[in-house]
Image (cartoon, helix red, strand yellow):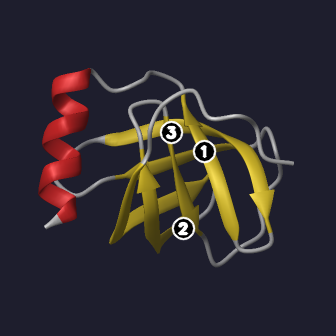
Amino acid sequence: MKLPRRAVRVPLNCEVQFRRHSDVRYPVDLLDFSKDGCCISPPVRVEVGESVWVRIPGMEATHAKVAWTDQWKVGLKFDKPFHAAVFESVATRLGK
């Protein structure tokens, strides 16, 4: 079940790194991005509430929780939302 969105998400189509606890890193498609979370398409099944890490190119890994799943799409909620200026910079850089 998808939760209502609290922030506008920027549609993207780029690759980021994804990792579950005690697992390898996977390259995954980042489908959209907001300061509070993102949507990815991981190659493995994850459960709502599961802790994961996402590494956006040029940044440190960001810890998140799985907020929802819909087959091979997964919504993540970042533990610490991005500052508005950082979000804008990343969205601009990845959207090109």
Residue at the spot of label 1: 76
Q: Residue at x 36, y 52 (%)?
A: 55
Callout 1 crowding tier (Cα within 10 Å): few <14, some 14–19, many ≥20? many
Q: Is residue 48 left or right of residue 73?
A: right
Q: Amino acid at mark 2?
A: Val
Q: Is residue 23 left or right of residue 37?
A: right
Give residue 89's position: percent from left, percent from top. 13, 40
Q: Is residue 39 left or right of residue 86?
A: right
Q: Earlier in the sequence, mark 3 or mark 2?
A: 2
Q: How far apart are the alpha carbons under marks 1 and 3?
A: 5 Å
Q: Residue at x 42, y 24 (%)?
A: 81
Q: Amino acid at mark 1?
A: Leu
Q: Earlier in the sequence, mark 1 or mark 2?
A: 2
Q: Amino acid at mark 3?
A: Gly
Cβ atoms at labels 1 and 3 below 8 Å apart = yes
The reply to whether residue 21 is in sight is no
Residue at the spot of label 2: 24
> Residue 57 is drawn in which quadrant?
bottom left
Q: How far apart are the alpha carbons under marks 3 and 2?
A: 21 Å
Is residue 7 or residue 25 the one in the foreground?
Answer: 7
Residue at the spot of label 3: 37
Answer above or below: position of 70 versus 58: below
Give residue 95's position: percent from left, percent from top. 21, 62
Label 1: element kind: strand
Give residue 38's position: percent from left, percent from top. 50, 48
Quarter of the picture containing the C terminus is: bottom left
The reply to whether residue 90 is in sight is yes
